[in-house]
Amino acid sequence: MDTMANETYYVSYFIDELYQNGLTDVVITPGSRSTPLSMLFTDHPSIEEWIHFDERSAAFFALGIAKTTQRPVALVCTSGTAAANYYPAIVEAYYSRVPLLVLTADRPNELRDNGAPQAIDQIKMYGDYVKHYHDMALPSADEQLLQYSRRQASRAYTIANAARKGPVHYNFPFRDPLTPDLERPNLWGESESPYIASIGGYEGITQEDVRQVVGQVQELSRGLIVCGELTSDDEARAVLSLARQWQIPVLADVLSRLRQIGDEDPLVITTYDALLKHESFQHKMAPDFVIRFGSMPVSKPYFQWMAKVQPSVHFVVDEQAGYRDHSNVPSTMIYSCIELLIESLTAYSIDQDQAWVELWQSIDQQAKHQLKELASDSLTEGSVAHVLSQSVNDQQVIFVGSSMPIRDMDTFFLPEAKQVTVLANRGANGIDGVVSSALGAAAAGEDVTLLIGDLSFLHDYTTLLMAKKHNLRLRIVVINNNGGGIFNFLPQYQYDRHFEAVFGTPFDAPIGDMVKTLGMTYHFVESNEALGTILQQPISDLEVAEVQTERETNYAWHQQLKSMIASILKGDSHVRDSRK
């Protein structure tokens, strides 16, 4: 059989160089043109391969591993539309700053743009959604090209893993024969360290800059820390240390890692989304300054509030030059590693209006009490998120779908004295590929519970076959309201004529039958107590718990919640008088 002979080293050195830089996982989809990459990745003794039949789901699976570990994961596919199916996950990875190494096989130049099968234009096919693109040279056993191969692999890994992490795309043209020679001596070469090493890469600010930041807020008495999605517990603990040092409230998004970080702190305000839906509260609790860490929070009322009140000083902290603020508030961008910046800031003290701080804490406590009371009353979408906050075991991960699940989690996932990490694909906020991403988190070694809606579950249902193949463990809680529940909260809901067909989109999916067909454990959940019992059990296999709800009932339930919060605010004289 013809093989690539010594040209095999060109590909094997590239793969080994990724390993030398830190790569541990590759996700492969079957194909012919990608044979050199697929076979050699699978043969490498220190890289774990995951095989999937669907490129779209495979890319989201890789994204889930990379999001959880914060390390690059490689993706391998054949030429043609296979590569195009990576696109949604690459967009998500770009906006959510997740490192992916996208390795697409391609036809050589003589088979491009002339009708050859499975040949499309793959040159820079992902446009600006990758940090870097490179079209590799054809494989060669020439010593200079072998060095080039290692150099490019080091470069790919470094760029993907640098500050503002993200995807890179390397396109590999291959000529026949495509089969590598796995029996070549010393297949992986002699390297024991990266061909190109790198040090540093994060922005930092000077002590003079730190004094300037402190100087802008020292005379302002109503400060807030706002925390969106963070990527590590160390960042979350640093933010909490600053709040404690300065004694100012932290509005903590559900993805901030601050809600269940191991202990409870009254400075961590979690009900602000429910509170900020009331204009009187928005006006009377307007801050003088805001320091925001991480991405923009999930809460739409918070976004609208910032655009309306426009605090005197608005800082947005980002680890590297970028722009993640769509509120149009006049802002100062601080480009710095979060932990290093906070280490400098905590050397200073500022005076805050403690009555205002205590008011935030008091109203938050009252609102949490009402949320718990309402969520304990009956089984509905919000109560599922609350049961998760109470019942999921310590050290677990909750992966959350977009649309209503993430919003219900933002409202009802309340603090507990345990450590639970909440993850979601909030770069592009899509409902596609969520099951695959949660499975990626499970493949990274975490105990994962996925909260997802029925339409998002249907989008990615077939990836469960891949999960069974690899014996992955995942608990999926599916909220089945037979359609798109979020649209009941949008203006389209007022137009009955086409609402159900175009926006409600009921498909009457037999989720129980679909799950049982795959031989998975299935639970039909009818009460909060039953769900809590399921969630407290160890995750030992693939299982699905279905909670059936009605969109109309859920909408009415949220309106009841809004009225309850309004009663709290109306009855608290401190809120009424806070701006006098």
Image (cartoon, helix red, strand yellow):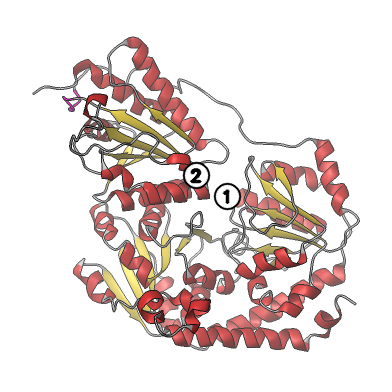
Which part of the image, by quadrant, shows the N terminus? Answer: top left
- Residue 335 counted in the magenta span: no
Labelled disc at residue 124: none
What element does badge 1 sit on?
A: loop
Q: Quadrant of residue 187?
A: top left
Q: Position of residue 197 (x, y in %)?
A: 52, 23
Name of the residue lying farthest toward the top: 143
Q: Are marks 2 and 1 in contact (CB under 8 Å)?
A: yes
SS for callout 2: loop
The amino acid type found where label 2 is placed reads: Gln
Comparing 380 with 93, the one in front is: 93
**Range of magenta residues:** 176-181
Q: Main secondary structure of the magenta part?
A: loop
Check disc 1 and report the residue beneath it.
232
| Residue furthest left in the image | 1
On screen, 230 above or below 474?
above
Q: Which residue is mark 2?
A: 70
